[in-house]
Amino acid sequence: MKFSHNKKRNTAFIYETLLMEYSKASINEEEQKKSNILSILKEYFSKTKILKQDLEIYKAFESTDDMDSDLITKMLSEAKLQFNSLDRDKIFETQTKLINTINKSLSPNVWTNFVPNYKKLATINQVLSKSLNPKKQVVIEKKLLGMLNRIEDTKKPFPNVNNLALKTFVEKFNNQYGDKLNEQQKKLLSHYITSADDDTEFKLYFYEEISRLKQTIQEKINNDNGNLSSKLQLIYEKVDDYNKRKLDTDLMTEVLRIQSLVEEI
C-alpha cells in the first residue's frame, strides 16, 4: 500500500535537512552558507517559535527503548492531541516562509539531502496529520507502532543527559579504549552536556568536529610518505560517511575513538 508524503510540510524533516546542509557546508568550509543556516535555525527553531513546538512532538519519538508497548501507544495518543492543539494554519504559513527562505538563501537542492531517519519521520507525519483515508490511516499507525516497538533492531540514540548516567558512558569508554579523555573528547562531551535542553547546538558542534577531523586526517595523508597513508585514507572515508548516519551511541563512540587516534598520530 502506497502512502504520499510531502516532506516540505514535515517540520522534523526540514530541521534535519538543514542540519545535513550545515554538515556539508562545514566539510566544504563554506562559512557564508554556515552563517545563513544558523540564521535560519535561529529564526524558525528558537524556543518561542511555533515550529520548535511542532518539532518537539516529533522528537518525542526518538527514543522509546525504555517504554513498553502500552506506554508507547499512550504517548502516540498524547502526541496526536498536542499536534492538533497547535495552530496548524500558522504552522503551514510559517513552513511556507521557511521553504522560500531555504530556496532563496541556500538552494532548492537542500531538499535532496539524505536524512538517515527519513522513513520514520515521514511515517510519524502521516500518523499525526491524519490526512489518509480510514483504512490507510489504521495501516500507517500500525506501521509506526511496529517501528517504535522494534527495540532489538534499532540503535539507541545518544541519550538525553537527564536520563543517562553520562558518567557511566564516559567510564565505559575509558575502560574500553583508554584511561583518560583527551581535550577534544572532553569538548565534544561538554557541548553535549551544556546543550541538553536543545540538541541543535550539540549537533552543529558535532558536524564542525567531523569537519575538523577530516581536515586533520587529510593533512596527515598529504604529509605521509610511508605505509600510514593507506590506513589513514580508510579512516578518512569512514569519517566522510558520518554525516549520512544517525547520531547515536555507536557513532559517538566511533568519533571519540577517531579523536583519540588522530591525537596519537
Image (cartoon, helix red, strand yellow):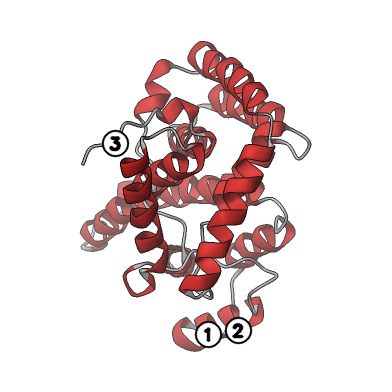
- Which residue position holds label 1? 172
Q: Secondary structure at mark 2?
A: helix
Q: Say whether marks 1 and 2 touch (CB < 8 Å).
A: yes
The CA distance from mark 1 to mark 2 is 6 Å
* Quadrant of residue 86 within the rendered picture: top right
Q: Position of residue 200 (x, y in %)?
A: 63, 45
Q: Secondary structure at mark 1?
A: helix
Q: Residue at x 29, y 36 (%)?
A: 3
Q: Say whether marks 3 and 1 touch (CB < 8 Å).
A: no
- Which residue position holds label 3? 3
Disc 2 marks a residue whose amino acid type is Thr
Answer with left or right where residue 4 lies relative to residue 95: left
Compared to residue 79, the image places residue 149 above or below, namely below
Q: Earlier in the sequence, mark 3 or mark 1?
A: 3
Q: Residue at x 35, y 69 (%)?
A: 150
Q: Position of residue 30 (x, y in %)?
A: 50, 27
Disc 1 marks a residue whose amino acid type is Lys
Compared to residue 42, the image places residue 151 above or below, namely below
Q: Residue at x 49, y 64 (%)?
A: 157
